[in-house]
Image (cartoon, grey):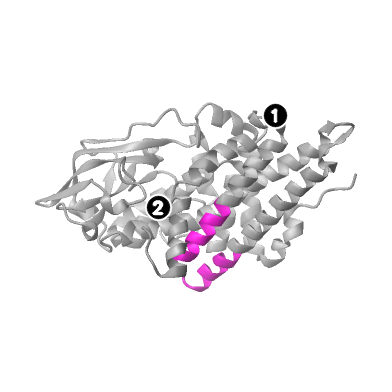
């Protein structure tokens, strides 16, 4: 039995990465394997996020990694994507924590905040001393954020905000929330962002329990009951849906990289299992049907890696900008691939595939959420459909 070829050897992607990119990736890879993987199943089973790792994530420069200035690491888009892939090799919940902190909460302030807001919040968020969350989705407003019911009413030098946000990663841990609301009961173009601090009267973040996905991620609501926010905590540099959608585009790009980390975890562990699992006198990896499945999965993962790297290089060349349709293509493709890989690996593992001893079932359940959040698979399908036909099917 010869040594198997790895996905990295097959794709030869390392030959296209710079020394700095490899250094960043490998440092996060070590962290995940040494500090997280050994208890990933236990954390998932017990619905625990390892908050004690937050200072280590900060020391590695992973919080707001893709932002420049204000104590942030200023990594390239490719570097940022690579670190998220390594984090999601561990668990989608670990990657989600970093994504929400950097690509949503911190990016909102970095892109749309005042200089005073940036100086006050971003350095402490990069250090992990302040945890943020991002309040857009509501109980009755998911794929159609323009229909949100949260309202902000001007009252002298303050805004009074009322409403409920749902499915908010990090909210029970958060020291602050970037909340999007319609100002003075206006339409979608009246949407504005506000920085709401934890100690604001009327602000609460109840935890959502009973999840069968992203169990190692802390998820909650944001309840705003006549919360008073000073005018200086309104994000001044954006108005309308352009603000939150711009933040989501940053997060979706990272997810496109990250989801392949979950796929690789499933693939690597299942190849190892199939080489040692003997049935009918031979390892199941020697069977043609099993090899066909590995060939299909490996091909799709490699293609997803190439797609991510291509758009990552474009993003770096174009000052951090990609067309929304390009981000949709990458997120839609790579998350679909990852979910299909996880499901196939679970099947190859047989009965063992439902045990947390193996990562496939955990990643499979997590990816069901990743398939839905930051724009559902169906919404990204319609984004691409509109791009190709010029006709809006929403």
Task: Find disc 1 in the rendering and name its residue.
Answer: 352
- Work out whether residue 130 can be spotted: no
Query: At 66% across and 44% down in the image, what residue appears?
Result: 265
Q: Nearer the viewer, residue 95 or 263?
A: 263
- Is tag 2's residue or tag 1's residue first in the polypeptide sequence? 2
Task: Find disc 2 in the rendering and name its residue.
Answer: 104
Q: Residue 393, percent across and down?
A: 38, 60
Q: Nearer the viewer, residue 104 or 257?
A: 257
Residue 316 belongs to the span the image colors magenta = yes
Q: Residues within 10 Å of mark 1 (few under 14, many from 20)?
A: some
- Most common secondary structure along the magenta stretch: helix
Q: Give left or right: position of 260 versus 254.
A: right
Q: Which residues are magenta?
A: 309-335
Query: At 33% across and 37% down in the image, what residue appears?
Result: 221
Q: Which residue is outermost to the left?
A: 156
Tell me, for residue 57, which label it has, or none.
none
Residue 131, quarter of picture: top left
Q: CA distance from mark 2 to mark 1?
A: 37 Å
Q: Give left or right: position of 69 versus 345.
A: left
Q: Residue 123, percent across and down?
A: 40, 53
Q: Quadrant of the C terminus?
A: bottom left
Residue 239, quarter of picture: bottom left
- Residue 376 position (above or below residue 90): below
Q: Residue 7, percent across and down?
A: 73, 54
Q: Residue 329, percent across and down?
A: 51, 61
- Work out whether residue 343 can be spotted: yes
Query: At 72% across and 56% down in the image, what residue appears?
Result: 8
| Mark 2, secondary structure of its residue | helix
Q: Nearer the viewer, residue 194 or 358?
A: 358
Q: Nearer the viewer, mark 2 or mark 1?
A: 1
Q: Quadrant of the N terminus?
A: top right
């Amino acid at each position: 039995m010869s040594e198997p070829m790895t996905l990295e050897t097959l794709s030869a992607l390392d030959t296209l990465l710079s020394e700095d990119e490899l250094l960043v990736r490998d440092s996060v890879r070590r962290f995940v394997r040494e500090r997280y993987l050994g208890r990933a199943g236990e954390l998932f089973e017990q619905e625990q996020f390892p908050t004690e790792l937050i200072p280590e994530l900060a020391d590695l420069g992973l919080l707001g990694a893709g932002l420049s200035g204000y104590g942030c690491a200023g990594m390239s888009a490719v570097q940022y994507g690579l670190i998220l892939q390594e984090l999601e090799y561990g668990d989608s919940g670990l990657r989600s924590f970093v994504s929400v902190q950097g690509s949503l909460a911190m990016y909102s302030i970095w892109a749309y905040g005042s200089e005073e807001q940036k100086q006050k919040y971003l350095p402490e968020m990069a250090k992990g001393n302040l945890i943020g969350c991002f309040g857009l989705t509501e109980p009755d407003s998911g794929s159609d954020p323009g229909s949100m019911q949260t309202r902000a009413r001007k009252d002298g030098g303050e805004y009074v905000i009322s409403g409920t946000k749902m499915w908010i990663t990090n909210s029970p841990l958060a020291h602050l929330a970037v909340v999007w609301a319609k100002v003075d009961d206006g339409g979608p173009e009246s949407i504005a962002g506000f920085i709401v601090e934890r100690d604001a009267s009327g602000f609460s973040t109840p935890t959502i329990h009973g999840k069968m996905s992203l169990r190692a991620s802390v998820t909650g609501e944001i309840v705003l009951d006549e919360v008073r926010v000073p005018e200086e905590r309104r994000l001044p540099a954006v108005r309308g849906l352009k603000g939150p959608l711009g933040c989501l585009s940053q997060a979706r790009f990272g997810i496109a990289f990250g989801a392949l980390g979950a796929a690789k975890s499933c693939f690597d562990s299942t190849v190892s299992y199939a080489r040692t699992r003997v049935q009918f006198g031979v390892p199941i990896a020697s069977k043609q049907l099993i090899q066909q499945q590995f060939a299909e999965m490996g091909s799709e993962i490699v293609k997803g890696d190439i797609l991510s790297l291509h758009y990552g290089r474009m993003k770096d060349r174009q000052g951090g900008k990609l067309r929304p349709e390009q981000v949709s293509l990458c997120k839609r493709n790579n998350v679909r691939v990852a979910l299909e890989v996880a499901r196939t690996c679970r099947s190859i593992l047989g009965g063992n595939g439902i045990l947390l001893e193996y990562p496939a079932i955990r990643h499979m359940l997590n990816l069901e959420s990743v398939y839905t959040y930051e724009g559902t698979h169906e919404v990204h399908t319609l984004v691409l459909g509109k791009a190709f036909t010029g006709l809006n099917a929403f």
